[in-house]
Structure formats: C-alpha cells, structure tokens
Amino acid sequence: MFKGIPLSKGVAIGKAHLLDRSKFCIIKRKLAPEEVEGEIKRFRNAIEMAKVQMQEIKKRASKVADKYAVILDTYTLLLEDDVLVRDTIENIKNNQLNAEWAITETLEKFTKLFNNINDEYLKGKKDDLDLVVHGILRNLIGHSQETLSDITEPVIIVSHALSPSDTILMPKSLVLGMATEVGGKTSHVAIFASALGIPLVGGIRDLTSKLNTGDRIIIDGIEGTVIVNPPQEQLQHYQKKQENYRRYEQKLLENIDQPTETLDGCHIRLQANIESPHEIKSLRKFGAEGIGLYRTEFLYLMAQNLPTENELYETFKKVAQGMDPLPVVIRTLDIGMDKHIADFNHDSESNPALGLRGIRMSLAHPDLFLSQLKAILRASLYGQIKILYPMISSVEEIVEANELLNSAKDELRKRQVPFNEDILVGAMIETPAAAICIDHILKEVDFISIGTNDLIQYLLAVDRTNESVSHLYQPLHPSVLKVLKDVFDSAKRFGKPVCICGELGGDPLATVLLLGLGDLQELSMEPHSIPKVKKVIRKISMEEARQMADHVLGLTSTEEINQYVTAEMRSRFPSDFDRDMTFEEKMSPVENNSK
Ligand code: PEP
Ligand code: MG
C-alpha cells in the first residue's frame, strides 16, 4: 500500500495504464554567433505554438468543466510571462546556448526558488511551470509522446504528472481513477478530477516504477492510498467501500431541492463562494441559494491590463442575470497579501498581510475603486446585487468607502445611468479590530459577512499560508469561538443579517456548533460543500445546536473542543465523519435504506 495525498474523493478499482512520460534528453550546444538570432526566433516560435495548443485545449476544456477552463488561463499567462521568456532569451544571447538548454536552465532556476518556499499553493504553481516548459520543449524538439486518446478500455491512469492536454484528451468515460507522483491540492489535475468526480491520489514518489500496465490497482481517494495487486479479501473490502461511497454521494445530491431547515423549522440560506462568472452554471446543481461571496480580484489577476468599468459591468451583469432572483454579494477588490496585480507595486512591503490590502488598497487608489463601484451599481439593475467591503478595520474606512460610493452614484445620475438606489452595503468582519468594535461597524452597514480565513489568522497571529505554523491555525480555538459569539450577539441586537463566508462556514463538522453560537441566517462556501452542510442542518434542531455551543463555550482548550465536537458529530453522522471512512456497515439505518 502506498500513501499519498487524497486529491479527489471516491474509490476506483481497475487495471493500471502506465503513461510513459520519460524525460527528454536535452543536449547542451554552443552556438556560433551568427546562429543566435535564428535560435531566438526558433524559441519564440515554440512559445507561439504552445499558446495555440493551449487555446485549443481551452476550447475543449470549457466543454468539460467551466472552472477547469479558467485554470488553463494560468498556463497561457505563464507562456506570456516576461521572466520565463526574457530569462531564456538572455541566456541564449549572452551564453550562446541552444534554446532547449537555455529554457531547461530557466526551469531549474525557478524550481530552486519554489523549493525554498513552504507554501502548498506555490508548490502547485511549480508543477504548472514544469508542464508549460515541457510543452515548449516538445515543440522545440518536435517530440511526440503517447497520448491518452487511444485508450479503449476502462483503466486507471498512473503517471509522473498529467498535463492539461493529457486530461483533455483522455476519454473521460474510460478513466476510472488516476494516480500521480506529483501534484498538490491546487494542481490543475486535482481540480479537473474533482469537477468530474474521478478519484485521484497524488504525491506518491516513484509510483510509476512500482507497477506495470495491466496490474490490478485500487485508488482510494478518501484516504489517499494506492494498492497494487490486492489479495481477494482486500479487494472485496474496497469494492464495498466503493459502492457505499457512490451511494453516499448520490444520497447527498438527492437533498438539494429540499429546504435547508433544521428539524425545528429554522431556515439557513446556503450560498456559494465564486471566483469566476463561469462557475454560476453549475451552482444550481449543488443547490446554492445565491452567491454569498464573489471574489472579484480574480478578474484583475487574469487580465493583462486593469479591466475597464465597462468590462467589469458586463461581467457583473452576467452574474446578476444568471442568478436572479437569488442574491449576489460582490466583494470589492481584495488584492495584496498573496494576491497581486501587475500595476501595483507590492515589493516594498515586508509584511504584506498587515499591509496595503483589501479596502486599504481601494481607498489608496480611488479611481480603481470608483470604476469598480460604478460597474457594480450599473449591474445592480439586473439582479439582487449587494456590495461587500473587504478587510475593514475601522468605521472610518466604511465612511470613506461609502463617500466614494455616493460619488459613484452621483456620477451615474449625471450620466443618467440607472442603478438600484437601495443597494445594500456590507462589511467583511475579518480583522480583530472590526470584531471588537462590531457595534460601531453595524451602525454603518446593512449586513456583515465573517471572513474566518483571515479572522483566524489575525486573531491567532498565525500566517494562513505558512505550512510550518499550520498546526497552530485552529478554527475552533476558544478565542475564535468567543469572538464569533460576540459578533453574532451584536448583529442580533442590531437586527442585521450575518453570514460566514470563510472556509469554516463550509466545514460540515462545525455546522452545528456555528448554528448554536448565534442567529446565523446564511453561510457561504465552496459549492461542493453545500450538500454536506445541508445534510447536517436538516438532521439537527436549534435546541441541540445551542446545547453543543453552550458546552463548547465552557471548554478552555482547542484540543478539548476539537475532541468533543468530533465525537458529537461522529455519533450523529457516522458515515460522514468517521475517520477511516470505510463506509462499511457504518451507515445508519436511514442512510442504509436505499430508497
Ligand atoms: C476570509 O478571509 O475568510 C475570506 C472569505 O476572504 P479570503 O479567503 O478571500 O481572504
Ligand atoms: Mg479574507
């Protein structure tokens, strides 16, 4: 049994198909001075070819899964990346090297840089860069490799890595599961596999040298394990687990048209967090009752230039129309910290998490902010749009932002452009300052949305992107729960709606506790989490939830809280929260009843 990282849930059993991705043999060649110009041209041609290939792949990708097509934009951006191209050309020119060798050196340089960074997301980017460079190398060498389009029987793909063209070309109905030697949670293969529901395990070093094509293998995407040639008894165990997991998923989706109500009739609106308008088509499939957080910075991150008011307006209008009559909460630009855009220099910040990010950046660049506000206002005619300000840490920021909002409204009135005059405005509660002075904040806004991802980071002084302190990033820390309770209580006193849009809001293990802590009307989460959270809500009463919260508020250590909440949830929902998730004889009688 090989242990890796579970990247897409489910169990696959079948024959292995080993994909040969042996590395190219690159030879170093010193160029004659008169060859240099030609070599640079050859390199640029290979880049252009790669761009065309990527566009082709993207066209096919959008037919498979919208979110996946968006991911491929990252690859196109890398192909246009100044550093990648410029570094290689400089190397060809200054050292008179052949293009294949020069780009391999560029890749090595970046790989070293990435290896020194302890961040899952950036590690995923290293794999992206690797794939892009190999695409360019293939074009330079004219090398063709085995493709997956020739598969004619159901198989499990095993490979060192999978490129976007591999995943696009593979006949989806014949791919039972996948296992790779590389790949993190943010890798494109992981997103692709989850979107299609194909079990995937990644990060198993040297896996390709440990099995042969035709071997019978099991992919357990729940535990993150791969088993080669299992004995009969083990095979039967996994067949049962596979069937139970399939039924479990099916059952979850059966829930989506039912109201999200506790046993005692309290309705909670479950909404989706999105990053791209492409995602809205799939939201109804998961039963989303609106968009609780639209992270608009991705519009800026993807673009070559800053998007114009009109471009933003067209996008927001599409989202509003696509969701109408359901609400759409548009969060204004939240760049800074780990998300940067080209025209703004963040390099000088030694502590970007505490720097010019979120609303601070918008207030420092009023023109940028105004163009976004005008676009949102104009789109507000086409649906139930609300505005949300990120990273608020003082009342003054809200007042200043609202003044700019009023200027945006005045300008539109002058231009005789209609908009919803009663548009609602909310603040993200994600800094301790905002949470502590919540009463002042609530006086200035129509609603609040708690960004637990940042709130936890700032309350506990734990960088949310730093792997070496990730064990200290504890959502159920007593301080976090106390702050949440205080915010809920204030919102109730002011009669203002409150939503949680950080990851904690989509964690079904925390759902009962969160409901018990306060009067929560809304949660917003990754669309995939909605059916799981809904299942929990439909099976508990507010009375039970309050009891759980009361007990937890009396506990003093995170460990005790984690243990208590996990034990409670396991006893209520054995098939959802069992650690080994064998799904064997663990389903409650109701769940086992396959009606
Ligand atoms: C949060 O901080 O919880 C949040 C939802 O915002 P983001 O993750 O985009 O910072
Ligand atoms: Mg945040």
Image (spheres, rainbow, N blue to C red):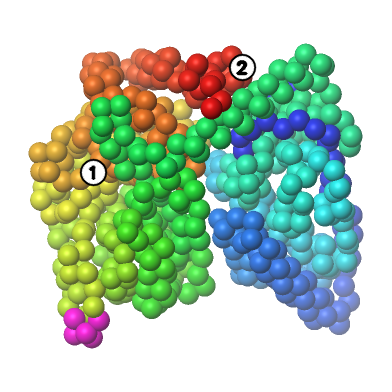
Dot 2 falls on a residue whose secondary structure is loop
Image location of residue 93, percent across then percent down: 76, 74
In-image side of 45 versus 458 (left or right) = right
Q: Label 1 belongs to which residue?
A: 498
Residue positioned 75% across, 43% down in the render: 175
Mark 1 CB within 8 Å of ligand 1: no
CB atoms of marks 2 and 1 within 8 Å: no
In-image side of 48 versus 184 (left or right) = right
- In the rendered image, the quadrant that contains the N terminus is top right
Q: Is residue 293 above or below residue 456?
A: below
* Residue 80 appears anywhere in the view: yes
Q: Is residue 86 above or below residue 576?
A: below
Residue positioned 77% across, 13% down in the render: 233
Residue range (magenta): 413-417
Q: Label 2 belongs to which residue?
A: 584
What kind of residue is marked 2?
Glu
Image location of residue 586, percent across then percent down: 55, 15
Magenta segment's dominant SS is loop
- Say the numbered circle drawn on residue 235: none
What kind of residue is marked 1?
Val
User: Dot 1, how many residues are within 10 Å of its Cα: few (below 14), some (14-19), or many (20+)?
Assistant: many
Q: Is residue 207 above or below residue 381?
A: above
So how many labels did they put on this image? 2
